[in-house]
Amino acid sequence: MKKFDLLVGPVGALATCSSGSPRRGGEMRELPLIAGGAVGINDGKISFAGKWEDVSDAQAKERIDASSQTVLPGFVDAHTHIPFIGDRSHELIMRFEGKTYMEIGQAGGGILSTMRNVRVTSEDDLLKSARKSAARVLRHGVTTFEGKSGYGLDMDNELKQLRVLRALGEEGPQNVVPTCMSAHFVPPEFKSKREKFIELITGEILPAAARDGLAAFVDVFCEKGAFTIDESREILSRGKDLGLKTKIHADEIEDCGGALLAAELSCHSAEHLLRAGDEGIEMMAERNVVATLLPATAFFLRKPFAPARKFIEKGCTVAVASDLNPGSSFTFNMLEVLTLAVFGMGLFPEEAIWAATLNAAYALGLEKECGSVEVGKHADLTVWDIPDPLHLFYPFGEDPLRTVICSGTVAWSRA
Ligand code: NIG
Ligand code: FE
């Protein structure tokens, strides 16, 4: 007889999101569902995923009945700026008054204002704040997330942010992927000698982050006013040589060739891409660069959404992430982000679900560990009070999440 630590079943509609490769093109419209499904869990991993009738007589230490519910893999948020600290709500008004995101940044607000807050915050207090962020995204179904440095902008404070991410991952419940993004903005002390800042990143910060296993990825804000194509190439290449995976904030505000650079360097993922041109999109598809689209940022900055349909038509792997940060996308709610992906950016509901689960796991290089309900993967599940996945979006603006399971443990549950 089968034995489980935890058995989730029967499940009204189980969307496993299982697939041997990332879903692209027309395949993203198919979302296989098991009606009357079940998920068996042992030692934090999935040991059974299939029909309830095959395990209905199993022994389980604990069981969650989801017979009129929908179960999905936990969301993978492949792009956040956790850890951060401080409030930038006044920038919202500045933008409504006509200032652009970059103007606010160039005038010492934006990223640099969060940098000032992060620099004066102790590691312990930054960890406390990051824990709160992690708890807030958990409560919206995020069981794995990426976070980054980029608000320290000097050796000590960049490594402080990365250590906070390591501590967060170690204490759980979520799985945390750390990215070194020292090339987020040039800090004031290097304003008149930016080449020295690039030297600091390539010569000291990245090697330290890689040596101590503090980062899995390197990222660059490749944009007019932040880092040029040549600077971005240099920093990403250095990260790659040090064994880091590469991702890039590309063509967020203007098309400055970021998507093409991502293709040239075969980056793991290129993100934002609001302004990416056809050639960049085609090259990304050819070179297998995941397009991680961030519709909440477009919404929050009131910019046109990324051309999501084009990315899908051209055969790119498309992921959707939150870009959670205090300036350009202050939301902890992944379903809200997906709602924007559907109604704003034009993804079909099934496409949005692939984009936040298995495809997002590919964006982080974690496709063997999470993103789908498959035997051997982390038991990361969300249980929703809806009859089928389409009801995530119909009606919209609801909060139907009931339970979040991280590595086989109930990590959040509606009271
Ligand atoms: O992805 N564009 C650069 N970085 C972030 C915003 C960070 C901030 O404003 O604090 C982004 O939008
Ligand atoms: Fe970002």
Image (cartoon, rainbow, N blue to C red):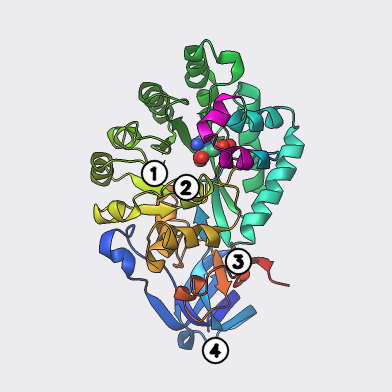
Q: Quadrant of residue 273?
A: top left
Residue 405, disc: 3
Sequence-wise, the earlier of marks 2 and 4 is 4
Residues at discs 2 and 1 in contact (Cβ within 8 Å): yes
Q: Position of residue 334 (x, y in %)?
A: 54, 58
The vertical placement of 34 against 102, above or below, is below
First along the sequence among labels 3 and 2: 2
The nearer-to-camera label among 3 and 2 is 2
Instruction: Specify whether residue 95 is painted magenta.
Output: yes
Residue found at the far front of this picture: 97
Separation of disc 4 and disc 3 at Cα? 22 Å
Q: Assign the magenta stretch its main secondary structure.
A: helix
Can you identify the residue that label 2 sits on? 298
Cα distance in 3D space between marks 3 and 2: 30 Å
Q: Residue at left 70%, top 48%?
A: 131
Q: Nearer the viewer, mark 2 or mark 4?
A: 2
Q: Is residue 310 on the magenta stretch?
A: no
